[in-house]
Image (tube, rainbow, N blue to C red):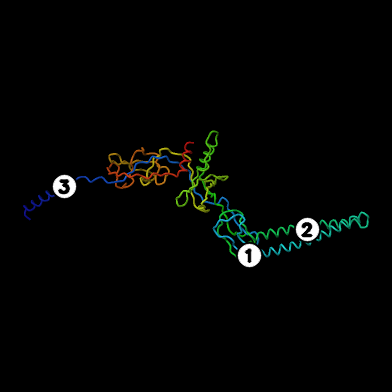
């Protein structure tokens, strides 16, 4: 290729490179990325002690067969409320009616023997005084009278036992409550060798919740109760307990403390406690999963941020704060308990700042962003709990 063509090609390439470099220098910087920010929420937040438990009736009664026999009828609707004294089951009564008739016949015979023995004693008594009969015969008559009286007493006891056994053939509800499913059906032989379980009855208003509470939380509750019992202190609020059900809903009726177990389980470091909640609607049933919480303090002006604003890496928590000029700053924070969809921050924030909730991956510390403000939804605890927690905080 001629030298002149090489020179022209080099000049063309140099011109193209210069044009590209100039275009690059003159291109405007890209706009800052858009992110969504929300201001830090300042709100009074109750501090709760919370434990997981299981609901149960305030009275749990097992209905068992007390006599042996074939079941004739089931006289209730499963899962329905029953009243005290209501007929639940009927066991074939005929063997017990026959036993009762036989025991009554034996009693009549024993009473006849007693009457004859008494007549002998009455007849022999004046004769022995006149030496018409020997004293031995008289004493024998007196002994026979005592034996006949004892036989009557024994037969009376047998009759009473037979009457009791016959009464057990009609199984009655010992308490008002909600009855469960039947464990046996007509034609089943019950009561042989052991008292067969027939069904269960639970009294569910109020409903009880049995909990396992950490030893540390138990000590906090116990000290709070002792402090409220001191002279001049306000009385403890027995209705400060809240019941949270499996679907996240809060039971509308506040509860009260019932009892704590005698000792702490050394294997788990927990203690068993029981609380009671009014249940007039009969919605809560035994065996349900439940969480129970009680407010023990109130944090005034707590700093709350959405949980999605908090980043965690190897146990270190941080949030991205956007300044007034759009500059991003990373802050290390110390989160505490969750309050609904928010997270209470103990340290790391000033309280009048904005944190990034969407677009965190676009922001870099020290860089600029275009902040679009969205308002977080403030978490409002239900009124009874809030009021009681506030009172607890004043203590």
Tell me whether the residue at label 2 lies in contact with that at label 1, contact meaning CB atoms closer than 8 angstroms: no
Location of residue 161 in the rendering, given as x and y in whole percent from the top left corner: 71, 58
What residue is shown at x 85% (from left), y 56% (from top)?
142
Q: Which quarter shows the N terminus?
A: bottom left
* Residue of label 2: 152
Instruction: Find residue 119 and name its label.
Output: none
Say if residue 272 shows up in the picture.
no
Name the N-terminal-most of marks 2 and 1: 1
Provide the residue designation for mark 1. Answer: 70
Residue identified by numbered label 3: 23
Spatial separation of the CA atoms under disc 3 and disc 1: 101 Å
Going 74% across and 61% down the picture, which residue do you hit?
104
- Marks 3/1 in contact by CB < 8 Å: the verdict is no
Q: Disc 3 versus disc 2: distance between alpha carbons? A: 126 Å
Residue 380: quarter of image: top left
Q: CA distance from mark 2 to mark 1?
A: 32 Å
Secondary element at image label 1 = strand
10 Å crowding of disc 3: few (<14), some (14-19), many (20+):
few
Q: Say left or right for 334 vs 27.
A: right
Residue 96 locus on image (x, y percent): 69, 63
Which mark sits nearer the N-terminus, 3 or 2? 3
Q: Height in image: 72 above or below 248?
A: below
Q: Percent from the top left, x then y, of residue 168?
A: 65, 59
């Amino acid at each position: 290729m001629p030298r002149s063509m090489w020179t022209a090609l080099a000049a063309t390439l140099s011109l193209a490179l210069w044009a590209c470099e100039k275009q690059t220098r003159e291109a405007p910087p890209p706009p800052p990325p858009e992110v969504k920010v929300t201001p830090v929420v300042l709100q009074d937040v109750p501090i709760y002690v919370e434990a997981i438990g299981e609901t149960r009736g305030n009275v749990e009664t097992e209905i068992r067969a007390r006599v042996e026999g074939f079941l004739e009828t089931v006289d209730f609707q499963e899962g329905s409320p029953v009243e005290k004294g209501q007929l639940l089951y009927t066991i074939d009564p005929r063997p017990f009616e026959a036993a009762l008739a036989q025991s009554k016949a034996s009693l009549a015979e024993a009473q006849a023997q007693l009457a004859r023995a008494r007549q002998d004693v009455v007849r022999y008594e004046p004769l022995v005084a006149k030496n018409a009969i020997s004293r031995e015969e008289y004493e024998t008559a007196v002994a026979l009278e005592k034996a006949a009286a004892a036989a009557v007493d024994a037969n009376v006891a047998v009759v009473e036992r037979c009457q009791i056994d016959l009464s057990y053939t009609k199984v009655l509800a010992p308490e008002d409550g909600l009855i469960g499913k039947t464990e046996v059906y007509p034609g089943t032989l019950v009561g042989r060798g052991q008292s067969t379980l027939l069904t269960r009855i639970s009294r569910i208003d109020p409903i009880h919740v049995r909990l396992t509470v950490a030893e540390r939380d138990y000590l906090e509750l116990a000290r709070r109760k002792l402090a409220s019992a001191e002279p001049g202190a306000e009385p403890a609020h027995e209705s400060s307990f809240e019941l949270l059900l499996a679907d996240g809903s809060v039971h509308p009726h506040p509860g009260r403390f019932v009892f704590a177990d005698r000792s702490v389980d050394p294997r788990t470091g927990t203690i068993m406690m029981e609380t009671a909640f009014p249940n007039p609607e009969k919605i809560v049933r035994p065996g349900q999963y439940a969480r129970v919480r009680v407010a023990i303090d109130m944090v005034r002006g707590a700093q709350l941020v959405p949980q999605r604003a908090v980043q965690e890496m190897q146990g270190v928590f941080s949030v991205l704060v956007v300044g007034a000029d759009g500059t991003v700053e990373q802050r290390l924070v110390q989160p505490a308990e969750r309050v609904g969809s928010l997270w209470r921050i103990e340290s790391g924030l000033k309280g009048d700042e904005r944190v990034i909730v969407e677009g965190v991956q676009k922001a870099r510390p020290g860089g600029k962003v275009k902040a679009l403000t969205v308002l977080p939804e403030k978490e409002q605890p239900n009124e009874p709990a809030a009021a009681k927690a506030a009172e607890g905080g004043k203590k």
